[in-house]
Amino acid sequence: MSSKREELIEKYVADIKDKFGETPDMDLLTKVTVGLGPAIYNLDASKVSGSDDKELETVKKNYLIKKLGMDDSPKLMEAVKSVMDTYGSSNRNKHRAVIYYMLCKHFKKAAVYNK
């Protein structure tokens, strides 16, 4: 009997393998997923629209700056857009957990989740 969260994580793993060509660090992916709390179960909140600049700005502010403790700079938005591009503009279902995981890896900030 798998939980709803485990089912979602399986989807995220598939995306990371298919879109990013990587095998995810399951421990980190689970922590990122848990860190998102109930948002992962909300269809709207669990996805990020790559074409919505306001939403990309929210990812930058709420995740990179607040959660990962990074200083604002152009490289933050460059990284967000790079992850979005790799995820694929044709892909309507960009999972927030996958995007956060990829950004966390990109900036080598996994230690944030070990506190």
Image: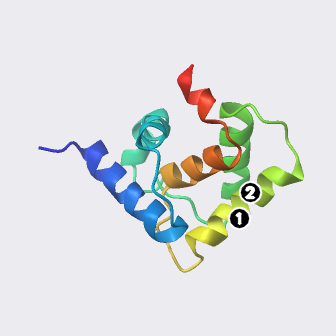
Residue with the most extreme bottom position: 90
On screen, residue 2 above or below 82: above
Give the labeled residue for mark 2.
Answer: 79
- In this view, the residue in front, 18 or 2, is 18
Q: Percent from the top left, x then y, of residue 49?
A: 58, 64
> What's the residue type where badge 2 is placed?
Ala
The reply to whether residue 51 is in sight is no
Q: Where the N terminus falls, by quadrant? A: top left
> What's the residue type where badge 1 is placed?
Ser
Labels 2 & 1 near each other (Cβ < 8 A):
yes
Q: Percent from the top left, x then y, of residue 42?
A: 40, 49
Give the labeled residue for mark 1.
Answer: 82
- The residue at 32%/54% (across/down) is 10
On screen, residue 86 above or below 73: below
Mark 2 surroundings within 10 Å by alpha-carbon count, few (fewer than 14), some (14 through 19), many (20 or more)? some
On screen, residue 56 above or below 5: below
The reply to whether residue 110 is in sight is yes
- The residue at 52%/52% (across/down) is 96
Mark 1 surroundings within 10 Å by alpha-carbon count, few (fewer than 14), some (14 through 19), many (20 or more)? few
Q: Secondary structure at mark 1?
A: helix
Q: Where the C terminus falls, by quadrant? A: top right
